[in-house]
Image (spheres, rainbow, N blue to C red):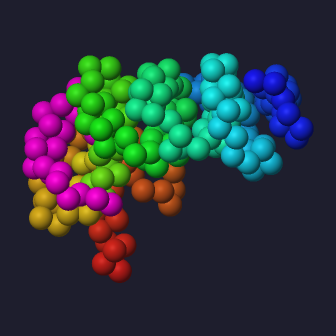
Amino acid sequence: MSAGVGVPAVDEVLAELSALEDPRMRAVNEKHGDDHGVNLSALRAVAKRLKTQQDLARDLWATGDTAARLLALLICRPRAFDHDDLDTMLRQARPPKVQDWLVNYVVKKNPHAERLRLEWLADPDPVVAGAGWALTSERVGKTPEGLDLPALLDTIEAGMKDAPDRLQWAMNQTLAQIGICHEAHRARAVAIGERLEVLKDHPTPPNCTSPFAPSWIREMVGRQQGA
């Protein structure tokens, strides 16, 4: 894409991102599977300046650079992508932060979200399936009509314990959301969490909520009830 007046070319944006690279931050991020060293607040400031630019977003995504892809997700128009665009992008989005932002900032705002949720849930790739579960967590909390919550609990009970890390994390989030948002299924959600013990010993900073589903459910329900 050639740059017009006031519109930076991709190489200009990449140079700006490169200048923001911090080796120490990259080392921290790489421990979590994210291969970039750009401070996310600085990245958001770049996005705020660029505003929405769909063509530039597509070109930045095509570079394959993680920081460029994160920026692309901030300046794109979520509804401008078709079903195949998003499916392809998810399969390209291996770093966790890219996948997280793609699902939360783009897919959730796209009219193809529900179709993709169902397709991704059934995908044999655990990273893709994890995105399906992330979308399911959203529906459990906001638009649960039509969801078979007992069947979701059956699937979680049968598969979460031995699921790969990122899929396990997403399934656990859905388990917690069911327990938090749906009183009729709360006792079963807590019981599943206690039996499977997934993330029971996960390190949790002070004043943060544990990702262990029974603890997470009890704390959030307690807040809702003013306890």
Task: Please provide the residue range marked out in magenta.
Answer: 142-171
State which quadrant residue 82 falls in.
top left
Q: Residue at x 39, y 52 (%)?
A: 210
Answer yes or no: is residue 167 visible: no
Secondary structure character of the magenta stretch overall: helix
Q: Position of residue 94 (x, y in %)?
A: 49, 23
Q: Position of residue 168 (x, y in %)?
A: 31, 33
Q: Is residue 43 left or right of residue 225?
A: right
Q: Is residue 143 left or right of residue 191?
A: right
Residue nearest the observer in this picture, 51 or 199: 51
Q: Residue at x 81, y 24 (%)?
A: 2
Residue nearest the observer in this picture, 118 or 40: 118
Q: Please, which residue is most extreme toward the right here?
A: 5
* Quadrant location of the C terminus in the rendered image: bottom left
Q: Please, which residue is most extreme toward the bottom here?
A: 226
State which quadrant residue 181 falls in.
bottom left
Residue nearest the observer in this picture, 158 or 84: 84
Q: Residue at x 38, y 26 (%)?
A: 127
**Does the magenta-highlighted stretch encompass residue 86?**
no
Q: 184 above or below 194?
A: below
Answer yes or no: is residue 139 visible: yes
* Quadrant location of the N terminus in the rendered image: top right
Residue nearest the observer in this picture, 43 or 9: 9
State which quadrant residue 171 falls in.
top left
Q: Position of residue 184 (x, y in %)?
A: 12, 64
Q: Position of residue 202 (x, y in %)?
A: 39, 41
Q: Residue at x 27, y 31 (%)?
A: 119
**Does the magenta-highlighted stretch encompass residue 150?**
yes
Q: Is residue 51 left or right of residue 32?
A: right
